[in-house]
Amino acid sequence: MSYDEIEIEDMDWNEELQAYTYTCPCGDLFQITLEELQCGEDTARCPSCSLFITVIFNADDFKDGNKPKGKDPVITPAIAVN
């Protein structure tokens, strides 16, 4: 069973991950790629735990291969490792 149902408009586009993301209670991010959405997939999974969410979206918005207009992209800053 899905942890929650989230509308695509409430998710953020992450350029680095090339995926829509939403904060997971474990502290990581639920993720679903544009390609998954274009294939009709509606499950965003967290890579750090077993939780997943159901993404509510209009499949027609993703048929042309472009991501729909919505929130501004989230750009994760690069972190220097010494």
Image: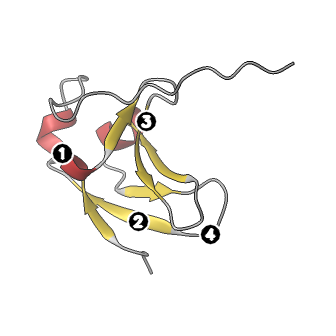
State how the image is colored. secondary structure
Give the residue at mark 4. 50
Residue 62 placement: quadrant: top left
> Which label sits in the foreground, 1 or 3?
3
Q: Earlier in the sequence, mark 2 or mark 3?
A: 3
Mark 4 vs mark 2, CA separation in Å: 10 Å
Give the residue at mark 3. 19
**Marks 3 & 4, CB-CB < 8 Å contact:** no
* Residue 71, image x, y percentages: 21, 35
Mark 3 vs mark 4, CA separation in Å: 18 Å
One can see residue 70 in this view? yes
Mark 2 vs mark 3, CA separation in Å: 14 Å
> Which label sits in the foreground, 1 or 2?
2
Residue placed furthest toward the bottom:
1
Mark 1 vs mark 3, CA separation in Å: 16 Å
Give the residue at mark 2. 53
* Residue 81, image x, y percentages: 81, 21
Q: Earlier in the sequence, mark 1 or mark 3?
A: 3
Give the residue at mark 1. 59
Please tell me whether residue 78 is drawn above or below residue 69 in the rendered image. above
Q: Could you tell me which secondary element the residue under label 3 belongs to? A: strand
Q: Earlier in the sequence, mark 1 or mark 2?
A: 2
Q: Could you tell me which secondary element the residue under label 2 belongs to? A: strand
Q: Earlier in the sequence, mark 1 or mark 4?
A: 4
Q: Residue at x 50, y 61 (%)?
A: 24
Residue 38 placement: quadrant: top left
Residue type at mark 1: give it.
Ala
Residue type at mark 2: give it.
Ile
